[in-house]
Image (cartoon, helix red, strand yellow):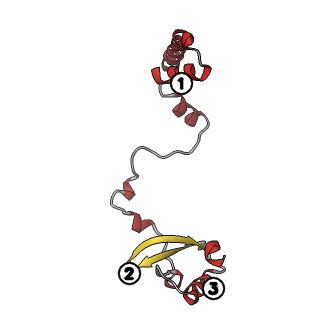
Amino acid sequence: AAAVVLIVVQCVNDFNMTPIVMLSVSVALTVNRAINARGHDEEQIERKKLPYLEGDVPPGLDTAVAGDLLDLIPKQLELPPMADIEQVEAALDASRGTQWTDLPIIDGVHCVGIITRAHLAA
């Protein structure tokens, strides 16, 4: 709460207002805690029924790693780090009419970068 008060006081550029702002923030926090079981942001999420991530991972994902969740990209869309013009044109041709807008740059077996189709076409 003190950090909020300091920010507000600095914004109005009058340190004489510090006690008044501190009292206002303290009263607001006390009333909020008395009315709401959770913080203001969590209350808004609940009331508006906004989707949000749970604090815990769903049980089905406990043993999953990021690679398990990836879509497999066609081999012809992969580019080496020092691709020549023919390789770039072949990747652009292969990516036309597909969902792939970003192409991986593969060095051996590791992805070392990503480049957009628009950058390659330019």
- Say which quarter of the image contains residue 91: bottom right
Q: Is the Cβ of the residue at disc 3 closer than 8 Å to that at disc 1?
A: no
Specify whether 112 is left or right of 9. Answer: left
Decide: few, some or many residues near mark 1? Use Cα within 10 Å; few <14, some 14-19, many ≥20. Answer: few
Q: Which of marks 3 and 1 is in front?
A: 1
Q: Real-space Cα distance between discs 3 and 2?
A: 23 Å
- Foreground: 23 or 36? 23
Callout 3: helix, strand or loop?
A: helix
Disc 1 marks a residue whose amino acid type is Ile
Callout 1: helix, strand or loop?
A: helix
- Who comes first in sequence, dot 3 or dot 1? 1
Residue under label 2: 108
Decide: few, some or many residues near mark 2? Use Cα within 10 Å; few <14, some 14-19, many ≥20. Answer: few
Residue under label 1: 7
Image position of 14 with respect to 44: above or below: above
- The numbered mark at residue 93 is 3
Q: Real-space Cα distance between discs 3 and 1?
A: 54 Å
Disc 2 marks a residue whose amino acid type is Gly
Residue furthest bottom in the image: 86
Image position of 96 with respect to 68: above or below: below
Q: Quadrant of the C terminus?
A: bottom right
Residue at (61, 77) in percent of width and height: 120
